[in-house]
Image (cartoon, rainbow, N blue to C red):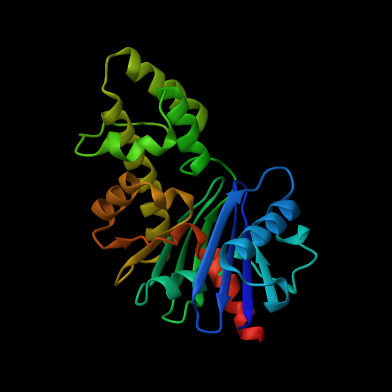
């Protein structure tokens, strides 16, 4: 059994995927920390221990993400745009749009059925609408980021006027002082992220079928619900949504074999 390995080194998390020649997927996610290379190598070792595969079975490795250049042991590096398109199409066949919200950037991709990227827009200049944005807001609310989706469920969103992380934090603290419920504030934050992403999608042209939601923020069902309400199409997540880039990298590695 040969293995193709895809590694997506993100600003917050490093995702490692093993794909065998039957396209079975094994995935490991760990914090990137101070060393992308160390995170990737430790992730590979963890997956080898978990799966029982041996290092000699790894025949091709492709790296992507912001830290990909640090992985000199990789056979090839590929942009995250290309990898996310491939991975999303593999996870959710028939999707023509990818909405990816990671730790410190967000992007939208138009893709064809094979996952080839036809057009894209990316926000990597500011933390607004990213995982980092939600972490800061969760801290201001005194909750864990994992609690946000449940807090916002069935809540009427309060309007959040600013998407700047600094100004939004001040706004959230002010709303709490006024006695506004935390759930309503969180629903408002989710809605503001969805509006920002929907505006990016609109600049690419309206999708026809369905969107795949990828990246770490795809774990937040509150943001997913807000996206669906605003865009009027299914916004689908997968259990491996956070690892879509690494899956795309593994697919490219498999092609190399």
Q: Where 174 falls versus 138 (above or below)?
A: above
**Quadrant hosting residue 58:** bottom right
Horizontal and vertical percent position of residue 176: 34, 17
Horizontal side of residue 2 vs 229, given as left or right: right
The residue closer to the viewer here, 246 or 111, is: 246
Q: Residue at x 55, y 71 (%)?
A: 248
Q: Is residue 161 above or below residue 9?
A: above
Is any part of residue 179 visible from this angle? yes
* Left or right of residue 105: residue 240: left
Q: Is residue 59 visible?
A: no
Which quadrant of the figure contains the N terminus? bottom right
Residue 82 at x, y percent in the picture = 57, 71
Along the line of sight, the residue nearer the viewer: 104 or 119: 104
Instruction: Please indicate whether residue 193 sits to the left or right of residue 73 in the image.
Output: left
Residue 18 appears in which quarter of the rendering? bottom right
Q: Residue at x 68, y 60 (%)?
A: 45
Residue positioned 29% across, 72% down in the render: 209
Residue 219 in percent (x, y) is at 40, 50
Between 49 and 200, the residue placed more toward the observer is 49
């Amino acid at each position: 059994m040969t293995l193709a390995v895809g590694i997506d080194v993100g600003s917050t998390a490093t995702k490692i995927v093993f794909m065998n020649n039957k396209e079975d997927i094994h995935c490991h996610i760990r914090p990137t920390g101070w060393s992308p290379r160390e995170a990737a190598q430790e992730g590979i070792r963890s997956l080898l221990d978990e799966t029982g595969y041996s290092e000699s079975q790894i025949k091709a490795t492709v790296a992507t993400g912001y830290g990909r250049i640090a992985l000199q042991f990789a056979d090839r590096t590929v942009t995250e745009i290309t990898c996310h398109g491939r991975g999303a199409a593999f996870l959710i066949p028939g999707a023509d749009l990818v909405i990816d919200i990671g730790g410190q950037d967000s992007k939208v991709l138009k893709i064809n059925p094979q996952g080839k990227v036809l057009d894209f827009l990316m926000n990597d200049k500011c933390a607004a609408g990213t995982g980092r944005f939600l972490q800061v807001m969760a801290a201001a609310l005194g909750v864990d980021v994992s609690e946000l989706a449940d807090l916002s469920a069935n809540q009427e969103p309060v309007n959040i006027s600013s998407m700047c992380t600094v100004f939004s934090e001040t706004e959230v603290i002010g709303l709490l002082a006024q006695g506004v419920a935390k759930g309503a504030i969180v629903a408002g934050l989710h809605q503001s992220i969805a509006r920002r992403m929907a505006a990016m999608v609109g600049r690419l042209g309206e999708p026809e079928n369905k969107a795949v939601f990828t990246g770490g923020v795809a774990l937040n069902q509150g943001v997913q619900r807000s996206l669906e309400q605003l865009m009027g199409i299914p916004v689908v997540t997968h259990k491996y949504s956070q690892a879509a880039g690494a899956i795309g990298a593994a697919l490219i590695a498999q092609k190399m074999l």
